[in-house]
Image: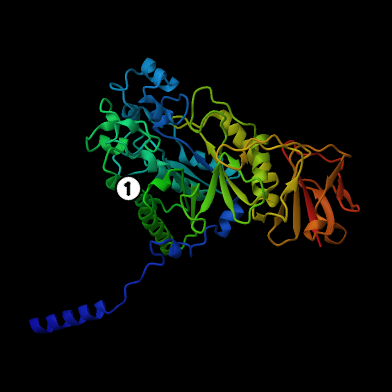
Amino acid sequence: MKYIVLLVAATVFAGCSSIPVKSEKYTADWESLSAHKAAPEWFSDAKLGIYFTWGVHTVPAFHNEWYPWHMYRSDGHEVEKHHRETYGDPKDFNYHDFVPMFTSEHFDAADWAKLFREAGAKFAGPCAQHHDGFALWKSKVNPWNAYDKGPKQDLTGKLEKAIKGEGMKFITTFHHARNGQRYADTPEKWGGYNSHFTYHPDYATSSTDPVLSKLYGNMPEEEFNQYWFDQLKEVVDQYSPDIMWFDSWMNIIPESVRQEYVAYYLNEAARKNQDVVLAYKQNDLPKSVGILDIEQGGKKDLSESIWLTDVTLSKKSWCYVEGQEYKPAALVVRNMIDVWSKNGIVLLNVSPRADGVIPQAQRDVLRDIGVWMKKHAEAVYETRPFDFNGFGQAKAEDGHFGGQSSTVEYTEHDGRFLQSKDGKYLYLFMLGKPKAGSEIEIRGLAQHDFYPEQDVRRITVMGTDMEAEWYFGLRNFFLTVPDAQMDEIATVFRFELN
């Protein structure tokens, strides 16, 4: 009987060994990874996402999210002075001493998700880890995480459930590539820019304690690179984000490690039937693999490829600080329209307090944006750029990170175009409140194989049944603004095409 059992077992084993193991769809090289569609259809349709710079750096609520960068530097910066005067010498009160003060006791994931959806966002999520090494998810890899310390909650897990429950896609953003200490052996570079915490033997930033060193990134570079990857893998496994977005400095992670990460993310997404997005800055990923993000700005011209910009709702910093000021909804929306007209998507940043409250001033702006978005949803979502993006008189200053500024002051003299995917409608956004009876002159329509006399059936003001009169001159198109209620933020004219 024993011989029969052994024979059967051997046969089964031999049979199993002959079954081919399912191969991965992507391998860790750019050629293979480029087979991934960088911009899935849902992303092109979405137009607006919201994320939030929130973490331990919100506890001091001073200057900006670079507080931990400045507090250890002996250069007389206002943060260093503030820290010494308020909390004491950094030798005695370290950055990790802020962690128990990051309580988030009023955090309500369902409330946040509802607010973001009502603001018009189609995707949302947290800054999962900033440069400071603190993770907002339940982590076994990183001991400095929101489940084990500070809030004692899986913030990312709760947000994922609430955001997806509101019908939005889920984004996680990462800034932790520069968390690693890269200058421990070169004192002349202890304040180097590629490491977020200033290395110095007098401070905890140089600690070799196995727990503290994880927060301050004080470990051999090869070990840190694996630590960087393992945290991303953990987020992919636990929360299945639809977008993973990376701040600058991803390029200081070795190319082979970046390739391993991208392959892992895309293969996991393929297993889950997800069409996912990788967003990057500068040259940190190949254009064929991810979506380029331009911080606090936008492209100056219409782009053939889809792109992204991350912009703040606030004026002073990305995270919450005392005395924060916010942009009015009109400024935000008009600049978003310009981005959309050039084939861009907007990622809008809000800044909750350390106690988990999104201040009312921010909520008010988001709700004003949401009212406009809901009214003009047809002209915004599931649209595509027209042959040229628009016209006008506004002058755009250069952005700090390329392209143009995200705070251009547009007026009723500036217009932008989008069109429906089926080509049945053209939408003209006037970035201000045009006066009834005034005439809008548009050059260039005929130059783009658009012949209004043949193509336009009628033009109406969105939100009303009021038709606008129009005619085609020798070279230009003229539209007369009807005596209808114009929108204070941006009025949209809907061209119904033949």
The number of numbered discs placed on residues in the rendered structure image is: 1
In the image, what residue type sits under mark 1? Answer: Asn
Quadrant for the C terminus, please: bottom right
The answer to which quarter of the image holds residue 207 is top left
Residue located 27% across and 32% down the image? 206
Visible in this render: residue 147?
yes
Image-based side of 8 in relation to 26, left or right: left
- Nearest the camera: 405 or 21? 405
The answer to which quarter of the image holds residue 356 is top left
Colour mapping used in the image: rainbow
- Nearest the camera: 127 or 484? 127
Is residue 257 depicted above or below 296 in this figure?
below
Q: Position of residue 151 (x, y in %)?
A: 36, 34
As drawn, the residue found furthest toward the left would be: 2
Quadrant for the N terminus, please: bottom left
Residue located 38% across and 17% down the image? 86
Dot 1: few (<14), some (14–19), or many (≥20) neighbours within 10 Å?
A: some
Residue located 39% across and 32% down the image? 56
As drawn, the residue found furthest toward the top would be: 85
Image-based side of 445 in relation to 293, left or right: right
Q: Position of residue 23 (x, y in %)?
A: 36, 70
Does dot 1 land on a helix, a strand or a loop? helix
As drawn, the residue found furthest toward the front would be: 188
| Residue receiving disc 1 | 225
Q: Where is residue 321 in the image (x, y as percent from the top left)?
A: 49, 26
